[in-house]
Image (tube, grey):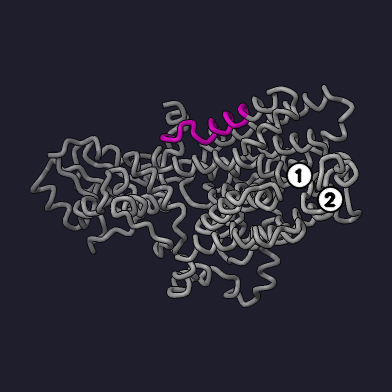
Amino acid sequence: MIHELQQWLRVGGNRSVFWLGVGVLLGAIGLRWGWLGSYPYGIFGDETFSAMEAIATWDNLDFKVFYNTNGGREGGHIWIFALIHGLFEPSRWTLRAGVALVGTLSVLWTPFAVYEWLRPNPNTEEGTSEKQTDETVPEGMTAETRTVIALAAMVLIAFSYWHVNFSRYAIRGILDVMYGALSIFCLSRAFRPQAGWGVCLLTGLVVGLGLYGYGTYKFLAVPMAYWMVHRRADPKRVAVVAVVTLLIISPLITYIVTQGDAYFARLNKLSVQGTGHPVVAFVVNVLEHLKMLFLEGDSNGRHNLWPQPQLSPILSVLMLLGVWQAGRAVWRGQSALLTRPQGIFLFIWLAVMFIPASVTNQRIPHAHRTIGLILPCVTLGAIGWGTLWHWLRHQPTERRVLGALGSGLLFVSVAWNYFVTYGNVLFDEYPHEAVKAAEHMRSLPAQVPRVIVTGNNGKSHDHNVYTFEYLLNDRDQTYVKSLLLPVSELPARLKAQPNTHVYSSVKYEKQVRKLKLPAGQMHLYEAGLRPKPEQHLFP
């Protein structure tokens, strides 16, 4: 990567390329880390569920390859969360610091991945020297154009609402974007003749760890297998990468072999096989996800600002221009920027990333299960950006102005949509009353009695209980359970301890209000209250 940075600086003739990249990275950091401890204000149950498992993992040093709770999932994101919680006390910032870090790293690695992937093939006669590239590489794909496309990819992913949103939502999908970018860089680099064997070892490590992430990453194997065949990769290097990868994932393979039912339980439950017409359902799902990209996105407010599409208008136009460039390369053998194999790779990559969500029958379209589409969409968009750059090669001032204007519009758009427009729905999508209740409980003196109201069976199936456990740092999950009290027993408790603070879901609001508690002792959560976003944007 250091070598690539040096090449970029030489291409630019000065440090302008470097500082442009730094500026984009700072913008990406601001969008992913700004007000992370207070926005989103609420916490969704899946986030705290994973966080409590991460805390248990750290406390017991029990890093599992697969966690079969909450539907079952590989352990990669839990490991990262565990390391974060080993350093910091539970808080909303700590909860989401792991995904913000992963999202930032994916922005950093994306331009290197795109630049390395676009470089000439070193394992063919045509690509053995830079002197020959004018005869073999498309006429428009100069070193400067590769740099522009790589920077464009960085801009498009840094200022993508889709990517920013999942970089602030503590679930595991964002891992696949990071590992996808790093894997493409490492695999493209590892099979170059001048690359050391250490790069092959690192590549195997990266690919192996990626398989502990989210499900979309596994489908990257299809386009990368095609790419290795096209690049005539050295079999010895392929063997080294494969052996290291197998060593890394051997515990997961063992788990799948011995406990396959648990591993595939969620997939079997959600599969289109249960619809009666799986082929029709699959085709319909693919079309729905195509519509999701350009017309109407995921309606889940934690996934998207519905009804906006997942891709911004700027990225949509650039991506379609990139698709045109790739299609022209496949049809004619070469376009102004791409070779036929590069075009084929892009179409394979784009197509396979529709599969993870399209084989399921729950909540279609689904932006999280198609999170693997972010990288191919961004890469095609960057190719589209490069196309405009090539067309305007005789108007240097115009293309710089256009690039700066496009980058600025993307940044302002995603910042406004996420921190302002999204605030109108964000507080309903992330339960926030339980957060206020838990923070209030945490502020009480230890001697003040408190209870959490449950049903008459004494058990709570409310996901907000995880929020209490997490924010109260109930690491062994016993303290909050000791506070659970059936609503039928509440009158007797208040008679014995009149100063008890009562925390209740709105489900039991009527029963609690009948007891006429003094002001300040009743705390309802999930009461449908929506604080103004400005109260939490700038604390």
Give the residue at the far left of this rendering.
496
Q: Is residue 8 above or below residue 377?
A: above
Where is residue 265 shown, x and y percent of the image? 47, 71
Where is residue 300 shown, x and y percent of the image? 55, 51
Does the segment drawn in magenta span residue 28?
yes
Residue 268 relative to residue 342: left or right: left
Disc marking residue 430: none
Mark 1 burial class by Cα count in 10 Å: few <14, some 14-19, many 20+: some
Residue 271 relative to residue 280: left or right: left
Question: Which tag, 1 or 2, sits closer to the chain's start?
Answer: 1
Kindly report the distance in space between the C-alpha atoms of the residues bearing marks 1 and 2: 11 Å
Q: Residue at x 47, y 60 (%)?
A: 74
The residue that mark 1 highlights is 119
Residue type indicated by callout 1: Arg
Asked which quadrant contains residue 25, the reply is top right
Whether residue 70 is visible: no
Q: Residue at x 67, y 37 (%)?
A: 4
Does the segment drawn in magenta span residue 425?
no
The residue that mark 2 highlights is 339
Magenta-drawn segment:
22-38
Residue type indicated by callout 2: Thr
Q: Is residue 131 above or below residue 396?
A: below
